[in-house]
Image: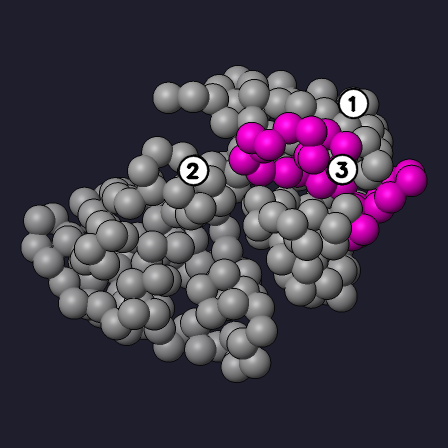
Amino acid sequence: MERLKILVVDDEARMRKLVKDFLVKSSYDVVEAEDGSQALDIFYEQKDIALIILDVMMPKLDGWEVCREIRQYSRVPVIMLTAKSDERDELLGFQLGVDEYISKPFSPKILVARVEAILRRTNQLGSGQTLAAGGIVIDKAAHSVAIDGKSIDLSYKEFELLAYFLENKGIALSREKILNNVWNYDYFGDARTIDTHVKKLRSKMEGKGELIKTIWGMGYKFDVE
């Protein structure tokens, strides 16, 4: 399979090298940009970029400006990196069509896991049509779920929720992040609606429901270990 190309944009050379080393180790091709202006030049020159990892605070053009311009032409997945953990920034990111928002300092391994989750979700990593973990098999094309070979009936949102959990296996997910990705960021409901859907989903999964772990005060994590 052809290696996917990722554009890493950060004005700190040390940060770019750290991210690049982990991505290359995971069999991705990486191109680098040291500011927002250079990032746009590379993006327009190279038509095969599968995902962009974009720092917020940069000279010339900041990450928000870069993302705003790219979104006029492309839905390429974008992960924003920021030194600030500000809810307003995160909301702005989702409004601009950011796929993930990660605060520094972060674990490079978690960053790579999130890159892979997004690429699976956008069907760039493999066929993206089948997900499997812990005896659970999801066929996204057929919209079907089987647990230990037995089919189970899920509502549309329960299906989307379970697929999102499997795509982000081992990653702690806040209720807000689940809401943003499964219900979309412009859904104005209470984030606690997640709890209701998770409860129903667990009951339908019977014994496998325990694979969806509750992280008190935050949200959930699907983990088979």
- The quarter of the rendered structure image containing the N terminus is top left
Residue under pointer 2: 124
* Amino acid marked by disc 1: Arg
Q: Residues within 10 Å of mark 1 (few under 14, many from 20)?
A: few
**Residue 137 drawn in magenta:** no
Q: Which residues are magenta?
A: 40-65
The C terminus appears in which quarter of the rendering? top left
**In the rendered structure, are the residues bearing label 2 and label 3 in contact, judged by CB atoms less than 8 Å apart?**
no
Name above or below for residue 152 compared with residue 132.
Answer: below
Q: In the displayed structure, would residue 225 be above or below residue 15? A: below
Whole-percent x and y of residue 100?
60, 50
Indicate yes or no whether the magenta region holds residue 42: yes
Element on which disc 1 rests:
helix
Taking the spot 41% from the left edge, 73% from the top edge, the residue there is 195
| Front disc: 1 or 2 | 2
Where is mark 3, residue-wise? Answer: 40
Residue 196 screen position, x and y as percent? 37, 77
Q: Residue at left 35%, top 33%?
A: 126
Would residue 48 be visible to someone looking at this image?
Answer: yes
Q: Secondary structure at mark 2?
A: loop
Residue placed most toward the observer, 168 or 1: 1
Q: Secondary structure at mark 3?
A: helix
Give whichever of discs 1 and 2 has the lower sequence position: 1
The residue furthest bottom is 189
